[in-house]
Amino acid sequence: MKRKLKVIKIILSCVLLGVLLAACTNDKKQQVKTQAKTEVKYTCPMHPQVLEDHPGSCPICGMTLVKKSGQASEGAGISLNTVLEPVNSSAISSVKAVTPRQEEVPIAISAEGYLDFDTRTFNNIASRFSGRIEKLYVKYAFQEIHRGQRIFDIYSPELVTDQQDLIYLIKNSPAEAGLINAAKQKLLLLGMTGTQVEQIVRTGKAFYSLPVYSPYEGHVHDVAHSQMSEGQPTSSPTNFTGTVPLAVKEGMYAEKGQTLFNVVDPHTLWAIIKIDHSSVAAIKLHQPVKLTIPDEPGKTIIGRVDFIEPMLQNGDKVTSVRVYLHNMNHELKVGGLVKAEIETGSKSGLWIPRTAVVDLGKTRIVWLKAGAAYHAYQVQTGVERSDEIQITKGLTAADSIAVNAQYLSDSESFIKTQGNE
């Protein structure tokens, strides 16, 4: 009997111990659940700075809040503190990173300009005596003429009188060789050719309508239109045939010394390149220049800096650089736009892609990688190339930055960097 009671006591003790252990286990599980419940946070997908401990809607945009667990972030390798940092100074992203390159690279200044006539080839045809233009053989602007070509006939009472003086001396004073030679020389100085003077001596008849020949070769430019368009591009009126008429007309009177035409050689042109003031100091004479014409893809012209204008024109904020070009095949058109790259030497420094820099106006920033996050960091830049930019202060060759900084910039936030809060 005593033995049975002892067994019953042992069984009751085991049961009681099991009940106590179960109660402790349930209490511990309840504590874990309660702790897990208190660590659950709710945030907005569009505004991660919003954190709540209960479900609801975002107070900024109204979107439904989603669970955000600190344990999940730790498992992904990102701490909760990193996630909670302001988005205008840091960002979590998988954007590709790149390290700066320390090397010496060739530097070229990019600029734009236009083609113009070389004014060194400008020649004026002026009337050497007063008279009336009887016949005009040049009918429109930009007409091509050649040296020795007949351009107009003119009637000049003054010239007729000088011719008659020569005829009178030959007939009445043939022994006065000095006077006759002086009369011939006067006619030659007035613009008559030696053949015309000999014809007067041979025939004894004066030219009442004297032919005038061009001493130059090139394209005819109207003086009136050239003066109107000086310093500014203007469109000349055209007639029904589509050509530009000349201001000089048949029947009009010309004064002695009056310029009637400009003759321009179209085989030589200028490329006028506009250089910004920040780049003028690097421009020197004879530097290589590569020109491209947007209207003619694939066409490249190699030249050099032939002249740097020492002053600004018409209130321009840029300096003009001239490149002399040959246009023997008339492929280049005056007024056409050109793009230029001027080689100014080489530069040694720290280089990064231009897309890695965000220009904030007074400052420039990059997104510097630190662990899983990127932080906005202020830098100072130097020379810019077509696709790269030099960093003069703020980075080292061991740093890692975002390749495309625009992807990490919030358009609705003001970017803050350390020391510029």
Image: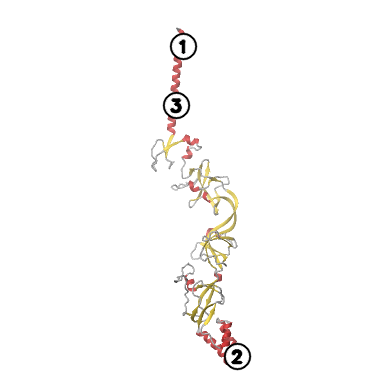
Locate residue 104, reporting x and y percent. 60, 52
Residue appearing at x 60%, y 86% in the figure: 181
User: Eyeballing the image, is 96 above or below 69?
Assistant: below
Locate residue 383, reporting x and y percent. 55, 54
As measured in the structure, the alpha-carbon distance from the residue carrying label 1 to the one carrying label 2 is 174 Å
Q: Secondary structure at mark 2?
A: loop
Residue appearing at x 58%, y 48% in the figure: 101
Q: Secondary structure at mark 1?
A: helix
Give the class, few, some or many, for how many residues have Cα within 10 Å of label 3's Cα (few <14, many ≥20): few
Q: Nearer the viewer, residue 350 or 378?
A: 350
Q: Is residue 275 visible?
A: no
Q: Which mark is residue 397?
A: none
User: Do callouts 2 and 3 mark residues in contact (Cβ within 8 Å)?
Assistant: no
For label 1, the residue is 7
For label 2, the residue is 176
The earlier-in-sequence mark between 1 and 3 is 1
Task: Specify the quadrant that holds the N terminus.
Answer: top left
Q: Is residue 168 visible?
A: yes
For label 3, the residue is 29
